[in-house]
Amino acid sequence: MLSPSESLNQPCLDLIDIDSLDSLDSLERPTPTTRLQKMRALGQRIEAVLNRFGGAPEPRVWQTGDRAGNIVWHVYDPTSNRSATFASEAEVRIWLEERYRQ
C-alpha cells in the first residue's frame, strides 16, 4: 500500500479506462438544433405540469421576425391544441375571439 504522499505523486492515468475513450466523442457540445429540441421538450413538460395544476390554460401569443424583417405572430391554444401563424395583430385578435365563440 502506498503512503498518502506517494499516492499523490502517482500519475492518475491508471484511473482512466482505455476502452471508454471511444465514448468521449459523445461528450462534444450539442448542436444548436439539438439544444433547441431539448429546450422545447423541457418547455412542453413544464407547460404540461403548469396546465395540470394551474387551472385553465391560457392561449400563448408571441412574435418573431422573418429574414426580411417582417413581424410574424404565433398563437397556441393548449385547450384545443391548435396553433396558427399570422401577419398582423388584428388577425391574432380575431383568432382569439373565435376561440371563445366555439
Image (cartoon, grey):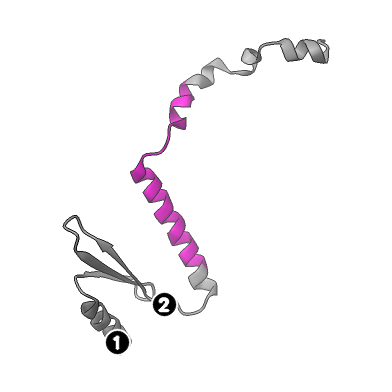
Q: Position of residue 48 (x, y in %)?
A: 47, 66
Question: In the image, which is nearer the foreground, mark 2 or mark 1?
Answer: 2
> Is label 1 in a helix, a strand or a loop?
loop
Query: Is 19 situated left or right of 59 in this image?
Result: right
Q: Please give the range of residues in magenta.
A: 22-49
> Is label 2 in a helix, a strand or a loop?
loop
- Which label was assigned to residue 102? 1
Residue drawn 46% across the image and 66% down it:
47
Q: Which residue is most to the front? A: 69
Q: In the image shown, does 80 or 33 lie closer to the viewer?
A: 33
Residue drawn 22% across the image and 80% down it:
90
Locate the N terminus by quadrant.
top right
Query: Which of disc 1 and disc 2 is earlier in sequence?
Result: 2
**The magenta stretch spans residue 32:** yes
Q: CA distance from mark 2 to mark 1?
A: 15 Å
Locate the C terminus by quadrant.
bottom left
Q: Position of residue 65 (x, y in %)?
A: 24, 61
Quarter-wise, where is residue 96 in the image?
bottom left
Q: Position of residue 80 (x, y in %)?
A: 34, 75
Q: Position of residue 45 (x, y in %)?
A: 47, 60
What residue did someone put label 2 on?
Answer: 58
What main secondary structure does the magenta stretch of the protein show? Answer: helix
Residue drawn 66% across the image and 11% down it:
11
Count numbered badges in the picture. 2
